[in-house]
């Protein structure tokens, strides 16, 4: 067993043999200029700042033998998996499916839907394309985790209060022990990130734990 004594709200114990890392939606569409995040009026440089730490986290997971699972929020080219309630929300300058500088916004197979180069999956790693905010909704993620015998999940990615928190809550309800790496997740809104971290670890880890990348690396010995 491994332990992160300094995790919040209290020490987190996990078995690396049954633990996976899930990196949520580190896609060009959210992190780079010209994508969905920027079309919604957000400053994407805030998200770019976590790329080096997330790369270190992924390298540590690989070195420790943890499966690394990547997710991408994206839709089928005919938008049949994008409900009108999602497509019509907000006032982005480019809607889902519209042509943009990195191809059609949030469409599977387009350059913008790809994971940023520094965090690209390596051969054999699972990549889950998801039409929703949560990675369990309408995806094969549950089956993949069962196949791997996973019981604990380490989370990273963007955005903290939307797709990361939604997926953590889905995982928590399914019985997984969840920990979010706080310096490998980010929001366009600093106050939302801070609030999400508080919510996750409130009431005795009601959703899960938080810790830093350094603390996780120390626990894994890598
Ligand atoms: C959003 C995400 N924020 N990956 N997606 O629309 O958090």
Image (tube, helix red, strand yellow):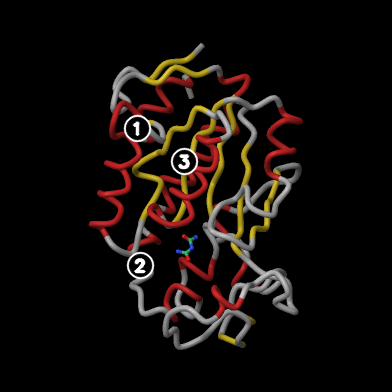
> In this rendering, would 5 be left or right of 68?
left
Q: Secondary structure at mark 1?
A: strand
Q: Which mark is residue 45?
A: 2
Mark 1 Cα-neighbour bin, 10 Å: few <14, some 14–19, many ≥20: many
Check the image and report above or below for 184 versus 4: below
Q: Residue at x 73, y 77 (%)?
A: 77
Q: Nearer the viewer, residue 211 or 166?
A: 166
Q: Which residue is mark 1?
A: 211
Check the image and report above or below for 12 versus 203: above
Q: Residue at x 61, y 53 (%)?
A: 71
| Sequence order check, earlier mark of 3 and 1 | 3
| Sequence order check, earlier mark of 3 and 2 | 2
Q: Secondary structure at mark 2?
A: helix
Residue 103 is situated, as x and y percent measured from the top left of the image, at 63, 81
Q: CA distance from mark 2 to mark 1?
A: 23 Å
Residue 45 is situated, as x and y percent measured from the top left of the image, at 35, 67
Residue 169 is situated, as x and y percent measured from the top left of the image, at 48, 42
Question: How many labels were placed on the picture?
Answer: 3
Q: Which mark is residue 56?
A: 3
| Sequence order check, earlier mark of 2 and 1 | 2
Whether the residues at callouts 2 and 1 have beta carbons within 8 Å, the answer is: no
Disc 3 vs disc 2: which is toward the camera?
A: 2
Q: CA distance from mark 3 to mark 1?
A: 14 Å
Q: CA distance from mark 3 to mark 2?
A: 19 Å
Q: Nearer the viewer, residue 178 or 85?
A: 85
């Amino acid at each position: 067993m491994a332990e992160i004594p300094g995790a919040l709200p209290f020490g987190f114990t996990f078995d690396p043999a049954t633990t996976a890392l899930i990196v949520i939606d580190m896609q060009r569409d959210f992190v780079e200029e010209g994508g969905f995040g920027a079309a919604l009026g957000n400053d994407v440089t805030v998200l770019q700042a976590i790329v080096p730490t997330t790369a270190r986290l992924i390298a540590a997971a690989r070195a420790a033998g943890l499966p690394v699972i990547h997710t991408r929020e994206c839709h089928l080219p005919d938008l049949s998996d994008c409900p009108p309630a999602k497509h019509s929300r907000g006032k982005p300058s480019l809607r889902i499916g519209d042509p943009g500088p990195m191809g059609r916004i949030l469409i599977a197979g387009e350059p913008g839907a790809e994971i940023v180069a520094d965090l690209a999956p390596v051969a054999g790693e699972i990549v889950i394309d998801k039409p929703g905010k949560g990675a369990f909704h309408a995806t094969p993620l549950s089956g993949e985790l069962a196949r791997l015998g996973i019981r604990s999940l380490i989370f990273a990615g963007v955005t903290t209060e939307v797709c990361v928190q939604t997926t953590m809550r889905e995982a928590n309800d399914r019985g997984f022990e969840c920990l979010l790496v706080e310096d490998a997740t980010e929001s366009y809104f600093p106050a939302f990130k801070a609030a999400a971290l508080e919510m996750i670890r409130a009431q005795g880890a009601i959703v899960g734990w938080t810790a830093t990348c350094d603390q996780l690396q120390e626990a894994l010995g890598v």
